[in-house]
Amino acid sequence: MTPNILVVFIDDHAQWANGCYGNSEIRTPSIDFLADTGVLMENAFTPTPVCSPARACFFTGQLSSQHGVHDYLNTWDPRVNDRAWLAGRKILPQILQQHSYVTGLTGKWHLGRSFERQPGFDYWYEVGDTHFENEALIGPWPEAGRRPQRYDPHAITDRAVQFLRSRSFDHPFFLFVGYIATHSPWTDHPERLVASYRDCHFRDIPTDITYPFGRMASESLMSTRFTPREALAQYYASVTEIDEQVGRLIDELDTQAIRNDTLVVYTSDHGLNMGHHGVWGKGNGTKPYNMLEESIRVPLILNQPNTLFAGQRRSEMVNHCDLFTTLLEHAGIDAADISRHESTLLPGQSFHSLLLGRNTTAWRNVIFGEYGTVRMARTRRYKLIVRYPAEECQLFDLDTDPRETVDLAAEGRHRELIDQLKTALEKYFETYEDPVLSGRRVADLPSFNEEEVWRLPDGDSIWW
């Protein structure tokens, strides 16, 4: 039987902010249940540590230097939001539609033209902001209820349940649920949850020296930093708030007796610093942009009873491009055929066999990332960051320096290791990147927002 696929894709949900990933104070019973009865990927990463590019990587299976989205899209700017940034690219729901899937999106899209249903989706409920100013509902079924007057933590789930109950039951479904509660500003979450966290020790937040390789920017300059305990209480509450909604989705699958027929995926676009390294935010929380572990690590949990080998914690390094290829294989679709048909190399490696409890000796030992002109090669132990066009390098030993405070490249004693990792990094991008859309020439591409570091004078910031 062709499996249903439910992808829960969170905005700014860091890997560290989950009970199943070791947080001792945050309450995530529904997510923990999925992890305990499914497969948890311990080393899951985003290809780009900021919203829009990460989402584009998931939907296309391509790198930012292939699809051309290199920074978050300022959807308040009509020039940005009116553009279909993935136009001409066949995205995951379109592929699934061609294989008899009925498809839907509820929540955040953040890839342009959010006010209209995008190709590949039968059902569309897009919420572009935590206050729902950009709310758009477009679908084949009657609209249910009136627009809320303020932030409604249940609205995205309500629409997801509407999709699950109104869809054609003769076809498998793909549903993308994009929750946004964990995004800044970290305020105004349900008081019943926030109050329960205000007396926390927040002992899982390390006491760090301030990030020594740049200056604070973007969300790091918000007033949040002056009320860190309240911001953390709000953030922890937002995670529990989402966890409650995930529980509703699981209950709905149980109610329809389709849990065993449905692959549930829980992940996020990228990680988040909440005072880690003195940073608030993700890759753009500093200038120059960072590739801190808290920025690039994401939760990734996959669960389908009686199909996946449950109770696994896998250590292989994977990312959203791998997830794209894995979902295709799980749906019985050959990613190689898609690649040939679209004349595009897919960098992702399917980890479907790992979900079934099989081991492989062919898995990669290095993972790559990028953010505009910044690129990264990360092994189990070392992380190399290269900043173009100057090709300035930073090297961190994550075993001896897990807080990334000592740049070994500055010592001059690791030239051979740096050369090896840089060669692997350049070979990887030479293999997959589109020379026209490459991050190395991002300043020549259309603007994504008003604070792109490659367009501002050195050190400038227009936020707060």
Image (tube, grey):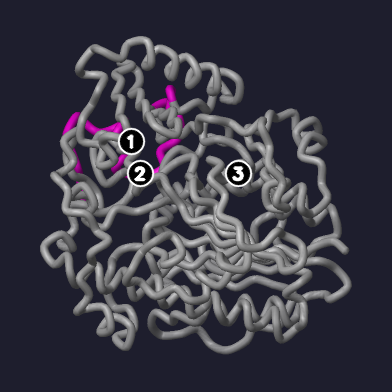
The amino acid type found where label 1 is placed reads Leu
Q: In the structure shown, which secondary structural element does the residue marked by tag 3 occupy?
A: loop
Q: Secondary structure at mark 2?
A: helix
Which residue is label 1 attached to?
A: 398
The residues bearing labels 3 and 2 have C-alpha atoms spaced at a distance of: 28 Å
x and y percentages locating residue 409 in the rendered image: 26, 19
Q: Position of residue 136 (x, y in %)?
A: 55, 70
- Provide the residue designation for mark 2: 293
Residue placed most toward the observer, 191 or 276: 276
Residue 349 shown in magenta: no
Q: Quadrant of the N terminus?
A: bottom right
The magenta stretch is: 440-464
Q: Amino acid at mark 3?
A: Leu
The three-letter code of the residue at mark 2 reads Glu
Determine whether label 3 and label 1 are within 8 Å by CB.
no
Tell me where residue 143 appears, x and y as whole percent: 64, 83
Residue at image point 61% right, 62% down: 311
Q: Residues within 10 Å of mark 3 (few under 14, many from 20)?
A: some
- Determine if residue 403 is in view: yes
